Image: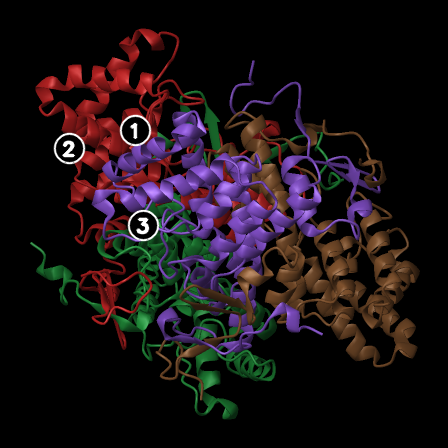
Chain colours: A purple, B brown, C red, D green
């Protein structure tokens, strides 16, 4: 029987994540010093969240998702919340925390919600033979419930998001584009055909692509949500450090008045 | 002249991080879709925080630091704060935010403080010839100011932290163990010899090792602080997801009553 | 037409809360220095949140609600999150923030959810003549949806919560116990009579009582949620300051091991 | 001996704040239901933070401070952080938390820092006979350490802050303007006379006035910091609720483009 809430559990409780002994730290069983220098950060993230190290293919997909969501310029509200904390002189960790807790219904929470929607859609459709009609039903349902744009679709700026194209291409190259991705594409088509959405442009966005790839990799909604949070922290930090070093304290931060003065377009192949 | 605080800056303001155009996202100049699938998450973090992609050596050191600080079991206060938020039913991002903002004077903030102390020490010592006497002066200063343990030294659990041994070995292998690491070692020795600290054990801890390696790589205090925050987020998430899936809501969380029931010791070389 | 998200609104935007001029601050039109020393903090809270100063009756009810939710000892997760942040050495504002964002589905969010449920119930029931059957339908609905305990009902510790008795008595004394309170009581009875809940004890809890009183006073769900947050902040602060002054840093905080050593029971009438 | 950090304390631990028994809640010894409807929220805050209920004079001063810091329009960074969280669709408690943790070196933390400075100044000056020379020394010290403006002095908008005038007048009326207030005034004069500060206008600001009044009332730095946090929460909430109800999600929030459209100037004496 579960212990009464708030009472001490006489049997104690367990964790399966990290074992701490004197001069020994095991992450999911592996000595942490053995992992250091031998596996990448992305690998260690996957190990910690799922219990096992990824295959090389998984490593590349996980890294592609983490890189793809790492930053989206100055306009996202979490980024601006982090800059507001910084202009007030708050610490770096405070700025990042202000950013993370500014993920909300309208920004940053679509990965988890979209994966949940895909799971629901797949369960209702049953067989992939029925994806077209199942997705049409889902589109109708979303219109009825006034959930347009649905999580994972539509973008303020992009009509063909280069991250989506790339991520779904990688999933195809690695032959991991299974049911979730197929359902996502079927839903994109069903939304495009819905009579009430004639004037809407609802392309798959990066959240939707990450959700589908995570689903096809067998990752849970929680892990997918978690990857989205992990991936954006470096972006929040970069804006925090830039705000601190380049701008005056207590300034008025008007995102619409900003311009970009970083490096011009360059390519990986041009590196020496 | 800097604009008056709170007033609109007539010239607008700039960012050098990420450029957003319709269907184009450039991170420090590189198209994000070109980075996806080609560079690791650690590489992208380094690019975003410093402006350039790391060399292969740097990639391995950065990843080693990020892996080394990724989790330390259930007892750190930020981990417990994240679990408290979760047992109350708060969202995943709230739990992570509660963890990050629980980094404080006694836990999680040593990386930045230690690097600052090393920078100060190096500036005072002037030449590496004078590290022994400079470090002795610093040790005396720390004792006088009641700053024992100093940031980067001492640990609740470990006397010879395996992460420290491994990270400093990697830095030596890659020939990046320069002045900051040397000064850190000189200070460790000076602390051990200080008469007032006879009864103390003050080994270099993982925060100190990360601080020195960051310093030797030319990374700023802000970037070093940032790497520590980034690296712990997956750990906070893993505890949040485990709390949610394994434990009853509103339970009493007594860290001293926990045990580990994850995989037994295993090694990378045993993987198929 | 609403401006496109993220774009600058050419017409600017407005606030109706506080006007700031050189050496003049108007809160909802009143000079703040005129309010200081003349109205209570509770009055000013009401003014700021609703636009008008309360009547004397309202003042007492608002204060009663704010006092009633001010603290509930060491076991609530937000309180423990605040203590965790403090034992790590985080700042006072960080500790309070960690507490506030640990309000979740299982703790601290019932006031808003219960008021919403009451609004829905009142709309469905239509007339107060139909409360008994409407509440029975609602109870059935809650059982079907597995929402037991419903927001505003049940408590980990109390069967007859003295705060509920007192608050509802005050509302009756001031003749403000209108439809929301009546519906709340009807729902309590319907829950007690539901065959599937025979073994449950689901008394109205303080969140439910606050929700009903707020509803009867015409306050919105947002204002009711807000009052709950405001009221708990002093409690979070008191625990933060006590943790800092009485306890050792980095201690293991086991709520089940605490005892109370404050003043013994005393009464207002005994004050000199 | 203090227990080792992280280990279980065999003797348990104590709290002196709130005692929770079945159907009984004692706040500092008083039954909470006896406090409800009989003491104001300000009184209960004081009781919880200090251990005793305030005298009527104290009640008015505490309330005056809490009212005086309740809101300062849309431009403070914590307010904008709360609005950013809200435009992203985050919850009300998240928005408030984002605001509170955006208190930083440049905004919102002066009350505690100023009270600490006053305590230090009083200790150095020794006797009130020596305030003039002590304050001159302190002014010189602040100039040398580049701490201009010092905490509690200077304002972005106001030269004669009406809140300061009012609060110090109330303290004088109630005859509580003792050493801290006198030292604060002596320091204001010393700053005005310092040759290096000829071009600066450094009036006492509201943080400074609150700090001095708290000091004269015998409140600790922690309690003074706490009062500042408590007092601003309703303001953060009011902006959050207004952002949610009046503005479009995901909008660009440019504080410099706002205007006030609330009630025109009105006075307490005109109320019916």
Q: Is residue D5 above or below residue C202?
A: below
Q: Is residue A45 visible?
A: no
Q: Residue at coordinates 54% horizontally, 34% vertically from top-left?
A: A220
Q: Nearer the viewer, mark 3 or mark 2?
A: 2
Q: Residue at coordinates 50% horizontally, 46% vertically from top-left?
A: A210
Q: Is residue A57 above or below residue D260?
A: above
In the picture, measured across the screen, residue D116 lies left or right of residue D9, that is: left
The answer to whether the residue labelled 3 contacts the one labelled 1, judged by CB atoms less than 8 Å apart, is: no
Q: CA distance from mark 3 to mark 2?
A: 28 Å
In which quarter of the view is residue A251 placed? bottom left
x, y percentage for residue B175? 87, 67
Task: Pinpoint the chain carrying mark 1.
Answer: C
x, y percentage for residue B82? 56, 41
Q: Nearer the viewer, residue B247 or C3?
A: C3
Which mark identifies residue D260?
none
Q: Nearer the viewer, residue D266 or D193?
A: D266
Q: CA distance from mark 1 to mark 2?
A: 16 Å
x, y percentage for residue C124? 15, 25
Q: Nearer the viewer, residue B51 or A56?
A: A56
Q: Quick check: do tags 3 and 1 share a chain?
A: no
In the picture, measured across the screen, residue A36 lies left or right of residue C187, that is: right
Q: CA distance from mark 3 to mark 1?
A: 32 Å
According to the image, label 2 marks what residue? C176
Q: Residue at coordinates 44% horizontally, 80% vertically from top-left?
A: D188
Q: Nearer the viewer, mark 1 or mark 2?
A: 1
Which mark identifies residue D56?
3
x, y percentage for residue A252? 38, 73
């Amino acid at each position: 029987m579960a212990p009464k809430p708030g009472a001490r559990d006489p049997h104690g409780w367990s964790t399966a994540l990290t074992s701490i002994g004197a001069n020994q730290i095991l992450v999911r069983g592996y000595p942490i010093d053995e992992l250091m220098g031998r596996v990448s950060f992305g690998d260690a993230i996957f190990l910690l969240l799922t219990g096992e190290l990824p295959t090389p293919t998984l490593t590349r997909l996980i890294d592609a998702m983490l890189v793809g969501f790492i930053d989206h310029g100055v306009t996202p509200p979490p980024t601006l919340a982090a800059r507001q904390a910084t202009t007030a002189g708050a610490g770096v960790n405070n700025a990042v925390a202000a950013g993370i807790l500014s993920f909300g219904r309208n920004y940053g929470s679509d990965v988890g919600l979209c994966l949940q929607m895909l799971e629901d859609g797949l369960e209702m459709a049953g067989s992939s033979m029925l994806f077209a009609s199942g997705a049409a039903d889902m589109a109708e349902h979303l219109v009825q419930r006034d959930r347009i744009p649905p999580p994972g679709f539509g973008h303020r700026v992009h009509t063909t998001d280069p991250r989506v194209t790339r991520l779904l291409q990688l999933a195809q190259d690695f032959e991991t584009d299974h049911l979730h991705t197929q359902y996502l594409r079927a839903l994109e088509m069903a939304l495009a055909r819905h009579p009430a959405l004639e004037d809407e442009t609802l392309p798959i966005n990066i959240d939707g692509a990450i959700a589908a790839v995570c689903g096809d990799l067998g990752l849970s909604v929680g892990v997918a949500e978690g990857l989205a949070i992990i991936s954006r922290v470096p972006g929040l930090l970069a804006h925090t450090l830039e705000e601190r070093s380049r701008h005056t304290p207590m300034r008025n931060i008007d995102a619409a008045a900003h311009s970009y003065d970083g490096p011009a377009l360059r390519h990986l192949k041009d590196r020496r």
